[in-house]
Image (cartoon, rainbow, N blue to C red):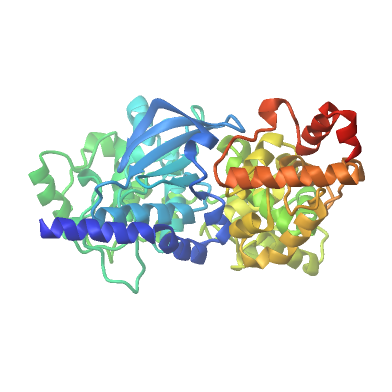
Amino acid sequence: MGNALSGRSEVRQRSFAWREEISKRVEARASKLSLSGRYHRFPKTLEADYKCSEHVLGTGANGKVRLIHNRRTGGRYALKTLSLEACFADVLRGLETEVDIFLSLDHPHIVSLVDVYETRSKLHLVMECLEGGDLCERVIQLKRFSEDAAADALYQMLLAVNYLHQHDMVHCDLKPENFLYDGPNSDHLKLADFGLSRIWDSSCDSLAKFSGTLEYTAPEVIGRNYTNQCDVWSLGVITFVLLTGDLPFAGPRMQLYEDIPAGKFHMPPALWDGISAEAQDFVFCLLQVDPNVRLTAVGALNHTWMDRTPTPTKLSARVAVDLGRYAQGSSFRRKCWSMMTWSLQSQSCTELRDIFLQMDKSKSGVVTYEEFTDALSGVNITGTDIFKMFHALDSNADGIIEYSEFVAALAAPELSGSEEIISDAFGRFDTAGTGFLTVDSLGEVLGARDAEEVKTFVAEADVHGDGMVGFDTFLGYMKQDAGRTAVSTSDRQHPRLEQCAKGLRRRLFIARRKKVHNVSCKNMGWQNMSQMTLQRLRRMPIKMQATY
């Protein structure tokens, strides 16, 4: 009883510092924008931004996944809800690690985490919705894969796993059910479900907690002394399944606990005679009992059977022009575009995704300065301009270009043309849910680096002089091609009328912050505060109007 009370006490203490702990680690790996733009607490709520349903898409390590719709864009997303009630400290640490890892990931072959909503009792994870089914369903449908199809699938899986390992993460539960196709007729795979994942690097002690699905579990995991090499073993089992349609280790659990540590699996001649020597060698190299002998993710990608690296692309002059235009935009505008990429559906980024993967010659999941320079070598552009472009794309100044940063640069024209996506970005910046942007709300999302530019934007866009920017003004700003905000003087009203509107806007702002919703312009048919004030004045007796 004492241990139970002690465990719950620790949970309360850890819950209080939940976001602060995640913030430090995520910002160290990614950026403040990656966290603040997606991690929401009251007054921001899931129900305000998404329309929920009871339609179950699947079940993961930590619960069911349901279908939801974004209220602004209409996009379909997947929702996983994690309960924080009655959690002991070790369970809470596991949930914390899942969110920590998921927020840090940015790769074409990994499911994107779009939003996180924290309440007192629950944590809601909103992910992109992939509706092509999982790899297990595809195996059941096809019985077994051709060698080319299996090699292509393994290449994609290895890219995702290598990215994890390069960023000191271990998935710990790789299996066909956790690789999803992004569409019914697509062969593009994405890795999902990080409920059992761990953070680990070579300077740490080996991991000891048993996790995963036994049939895909590495021998050293059963021995409770393992590293990220356990993921490579699991990929070896998946390769076996794709090529044969059967598991290498099957039977009663006690039998599996004997066969897996011994590396004892059966390869029926009828199944393996038609498989090439390279494919068989690949399986043997991944199913080595000794993790030090087993190929690493990088080694597996360089195996002869994986010789399907895309030809490095040379960016066209049109792409170079788009990158140059993006680089000329202000830092704040580029941050807005980065925010908007989270609203893009996976299928709309197919061409950009392929270009990014071709540029990534090292298969690390990011583009380095050397790779970026090489991709632009066929375009008549100076080294100085290439340097400026690279550092404009490298939004968090870590010396590499992440996938979402690259997409933001080339999808900027499309993003700026979508009012729904701009509305979604506005909602992310409006952290208090007031319907207005302020220097404080923007600073909370962007951090101190863009403080001066945020002040300049608010000062230029604040047509009412009250330190607040409404959606219409933000929409106009994002739809401009130029890198600065132009405010039309026609938006301004008579000085006395404007002063009255300013006071009402401030009252509305304060009321919304206090969650007092007794003031609502739109419900009364007013488009903005100035129009509301004008209509009120028109209804006043003439003598009262004269005082204004």
**Is 217 situated left or right of 47 in this image?**
left
Image quadrant occupied by the N terminus: bottom left
Asked where in the image residue 221 lies, by quadrant, the reply is bottom left
Residue at screen point 34% across, 45% down = 121
Find the residue positioned furthest to the bottom: 203
| Residue 285 seen in render | no
Q: Is residue 209 above or below residue 87?
A: below
Number of numbered tags placed on the structure image: 0
Find the residue positioned furthest to the left: 254
Image quadrant occupied by the C terminus: top right
Q: Is residue 225 above or below residue 504?
A: below
Percent position (x, y) of residue 198?
33, 58
Residue at screen point 63% across, 55% down = 441
Question: Quick one: 433 or 370, which is closer to the camera?
Answer: 433
Question: Quick one: 434 or 146, which is closer to the camera?
Answer: 434
Asked where in the image residue 411 lies, by quadrant, the reply is top right
**Is 274 situated left or right of 531 in this image?**
left
Residue at screen point 23% across, 39% down = 247
**Is 509 situated left or right of 499 in this image?**
left
Percent position (x, y) of residue 104?
48, 56
Question: Quick one: 150 or 483, which is closer to the camera?
Answer: 483
Residue at screen point 63% across, 67% down = 448
| Residue 115 seen in render | yes
Question: Quick one: 370 or 112, which is closer to the camera?
Answer: 112
**Is 316 situated left or right of 30 in this image?**
right
Percent position (x, y) of residue 434?
62, 44
Find the residue positioned furthest to the front: 543
